[in-house]
Amino acid sequence: MMPTQRRPRGNPRSSLAASVTLAAALLCATAAGAARAQSSPAPASACGDWPAYRAFMTRTVQADGRVLDATTPVQQSTSEGQSYGLFFALVANDRAGFDRMLGWLRANLAGGQFDANNLHLPAWQWGHKPDGSWGVIDPNPASDSDVWIAYDLLEAGRLWRAPEYTALGTALAAQIAKREVTDLAGIGPMLLPGPQGFVNGDVTRLNPSYSPLPVLRGLASALKGGPWSALAQNGYKLVAGTAPRGFAPDWAAWHAGQFVVDPKTGDVGSYDAIRVYLWAGLANAADPLAKPWLNAVRGMAERVAQTGVPPEKVAAATGDGSGEGPLSYWGALAPYFAALGDTKSLALARSRLAALDSVTPGREPVYYDRVLGLFGAGAVEGRYRFDASGRLVPAWEGACR
């Protein structure tokens, strides 16, 4: 892969190498609170365990805090994996796990330079290098991961009353705004996929899944000024402008004043695009963009209602699909179905997500299954939600604090 290209997903159905067992954190959860106004997810048990998170920490996170994606030949770890792990640790009220994963990111993806007064954007990919050593494979940062990490830190500072996280999240957000945001003529601020390699002449490559609405709202709420509200508005324009049949593509481009098909990958929607539906489903119903965003990508819900399964790949321009999406897709789609009030498809998703809590030889959930599964199952089980300002509301924040 060239440094300007993004994450190889690997084979989502391959076996995941077992990681060193970690002490699992207890999830303090209230029995009240719905993930969205349109749906009523089952409440998490008061001050109870989160088995899927425990399995993630045991099987995907190594003892030093490295989130391992063993489905790839290079046995990679990515800024994406670390960012998601930080979020789940916050939802689980696992500060020790949060610090381990943050420490690994600081030491290995940021070269030790990840402090409020000395911060480098983390490299996106680390793993087994061609010369046999272990280290950074691609130093180009990934803006979606950076946005999530900044959000995780700011919310950790607020929820755990820890100003050191707040300062670090603020510094990271400033670097994102400086190095990973561009101004598209006729649109305004837009999140680039990374600092380098995505602008070629008058063509700017973009990724619709890099703009999670609740996270951008949370950054706008926590930080005064900055591009975050504009990025939310323009992220919606990107999604709506590239999903003519209600299906999001993995990649798109901006050229001559309009959104066009990506010149490198075409209009296929698959392992990146599946997150567009997830972020839309997680947005609070009171957000003025929540309903328009959901309406822009209704094609997936309509297809699952017709066929009973999400397509693994779909052409955004025509809606033609092929294959069957793996467990990770059901994780991403569960909150989306809940937000749309699609109880039948939600029940299908929840039945598939039960695999996150069980171990079946030869059918162990892999990295992407686990992380998207935790997002989806955690939301519909009532373990967390986002308020209208994008602030995280974990179930443990109430009676179990």
Image: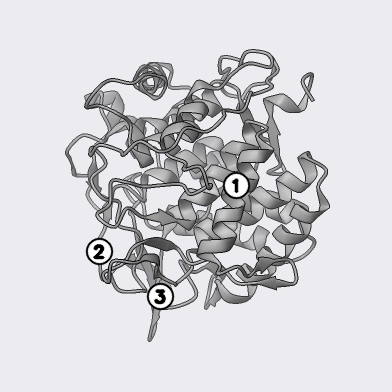
In the rendered view of the protein, which quadrant contains the N terminus?
Answer: bottom left
Separation (CA) of disc 2 from disc 3: 13 Å
Earlier-in-chain disc, 1 versus 3: 1
Residue 52 in percent (x, y) is at 47, 25
Earlier-in-chain disc, 2 versus 1: 1
Mark 2, residue position: 265
Which amino acid, mark 3?
Phe
Q: Residue at x 25, y 63 (%)?
A: 265
Separation (CA) of disc 1 from disc 3: 32 Å
Residue 387 can be seen, yes or no: no
Using the rendered view, name the quadrant where residue 124 is placed.
bottom left
Query: What kind of element bears circle 1?
Result: helix
Which amino acid, mark 1?
Arg
Residue 183 in percent (x, y) is at 56, 76
Using the rendered view, name the quadrant where residue 330 is placed.
top left
In the picture, measured across the screen, residue 252 lies left or right of residue 42, that is left
Mark 1, residue position: 100
Nearer the observer: mark 1 or 3; the answer is 1
Is 118 situated above or below 103?
below
